Image (cartoon, rainbow, N blue to C red):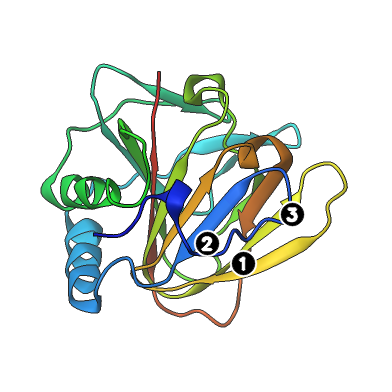
Amino acid sequence: MQSSLFNSENENLLPFQGKTILYADFLQKEEADRFLSQLIEAVPWRQEPIWMFGKKVMQPRLTALFGDTEVPYSYSGIQMEALKWVDPLALIREKLKDYCETEFTHVLLNYYRDGQDSMGWHRDNEASLGKNPTIASVSLGASRTFQIRHYANKAPKLNLELGHGSLLIMAEESQHFWEHQLPKTKKVLGPRVNLTFRKLS
């Protein structure tokens, strides 16, 4: 069993005001391959419109929400109703108990079909997530560069390579003081599915 986040020997990647830890080998390749295939094929993916700079545009990725069905989740003007937990997601949620001290109620899935699908700068700081939320982000598929920067002064900017089967945990004050994005790239040809586990109240 791995030690929990708060006793972890893994390095905190943030220099101050928060805690972010990367586990490159959270899932074995065979597990990650299986989960990726199952989720791409079975999830009822949707492309939602969002407001950006005063205009409504389609998100450059596909999404889905699973979790405790009585609690919806809202962000960027979108309200999502949760689908019931399915085996791959329930198994990963159970495995996360060895890594962080949070009982996750939901998981938001993002499907990046190729390098042109992306996520802009943002913080996961919705009121429903609580004061200092822990977000556990599991990556499946093509390796992508994930960027983090300080919200107030936009520096320093960290570039993290999130590979197949990796786990990134963002905790404590990180969602207050830091923002993150997944930029577009011309280098990536394969799909990527990202699972962001969170606790809604």
User: On screen, 6 above or below 139?
Assistant: above
Q: Which mark is residue 184?
A: 1
Q: Which mark is residue 113?
A: none
Q: Quadrant of the C terminus?
A: top left
In the image, is 92 to the left or to the right of 167? left
At label 1, the amino acid type is Lys
Instruction: Point out the tag, 2 or 3, that comes first from the N-terminus.
Output: 2
Q: Which structural element holds mark 3?
A: strand
Q: Which mark is residue 117?
A: 2
Q: Residue 27: where, in percent of width, then height?
A: 27, 68
At label 2, the amino acid type is Asp
Between the C-alphas of marks 1 and 3, the distance is: 17 Å
Q: Which of the two marks, 1 or 3, is nearer to us in this view?
A: 3
**Mark 3 sits on what residue?**
149
Instruction: Point out the tag, 1 or 3, that comes first from the N-terminus.
Output: 3
At label 3, the amino acid type is Arg
Q: Residue 180: where, in percent of width, then height?
A: 64, 51
